[in-house]
Amino acid sequence: MIKPNALKKGDTIGIISPASPPKKENLKRALSFIEEMGLNVKFGKHIEREHGYLAGTDQERADDVNTMFLDQDVKAIICACGGFGTARMASLLDYDLIKKNPKIFWGYSDITFLHTAIRQKTGLVTFHGPMLSSDFGEEGRVLPLTKHYFHQLFDKKNFIYDESLTPLEVMIEGTASGELIGGNLSLIVSSLGTAFEIDTKDKLLLLEDIDEEPYAVDRMLNQLYMAGKLTDAAGILVADFHNCVPKKRKKSLSLDEVLTHYIQLAGKPALSGFKIGHCSPNISVPLGTRADMNTFEKTLSIESGIL
């Protein structure tokens, strides 16, 4: 495990778009939040490029990631938005360079693929958290609680998620410990069979998604289950599945029925109700650091992700 250094006021953060292009007005609006934190900004060379639904070619987007890790003036890398495309350029990243230049890397959604790739290739702790254009730039979207957990980048306190934040539901009783990993279900499943296939062995697996119907969530969880990823995990954390409701079919299993089915098949301690993902509030957590889950106390204790 490699932890990046904490931020301090006056530091410079690099802003990149490794997936889809950001909404320019939203990105501009989000800069006020960065300024409130006392941070300076440096944009990736290709952040305004548009290549269909991608923010530039695969090589251009990978170059921005590599360049920001190499730049000694940049202390953290924040993704402007998700969308689609990180898996296309994951093989173009210089993981040796990243390992030698560890720093904060922050995002979620499509960025899940990069969280997995970077962690497994380098051991670097990364951060699953709201992004600039798609979250901080949306008027009225960002609650104070969402902003509050950005401050974990400045202070290396451990973090406890309990019911003082949101109601939590026990799906299977028990305790479990291990590295906290995961993120967006669709992107986790897309890693299977690749050089970046997620390793869930003895880890706490966090799952979230958006706009997927129950049958699609069923298909993806079934694939994870058949690949042994659910039973390999030490425990499972079910986060927000935003707008994952039936649309095409009049008859459908509910999302809860689907989730419960696979959690029970996995047979591992599991909690649900975490407001992590495509939701508001969107609570940020480090990935790759140690965490302890206790369903009897309904707590998730997470070790700080920074030095």
Image (cartoon, grey):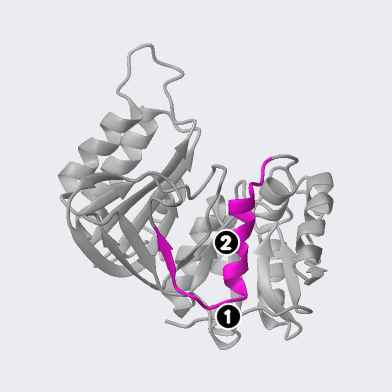
Res. 11 image quadrant: bottom right
Identify the residue position indicated by label 1 in the image: 98
Q: Which mark is residue 149?
A: 2
**Residue drawn at 45 percent across, 64 percent down:** 116
* Res 4 → quadrant: bottom right
Question: Which of the image's four quarters has the N terminus?
Answer: bottom left
- Res. 73 visible in picture: yes
Q: Is residue 228 left or right of residue 290?
A: left
Instruction: Classify residue 231 as left or right of residue 17.
Output: left
What residue is at 60 percent from the left and 64 percent from the top?
A: 106
Q: Is residue 31 magenta?
A: no
Q: Secondary structure at mark 1?
A: helix
Residues 29 and 248: in front is 29
Amino acid type indicated by mark 1: Ile
Say if 277 sits above or below 91 in the image.
above
> What is the span of residues highlighted in magenta in the rendered image?
141-161
Amino acid type, label 2:
Tyr
Estimate the x, y position of residue 23 in percent, counting from the top left: 78, 45
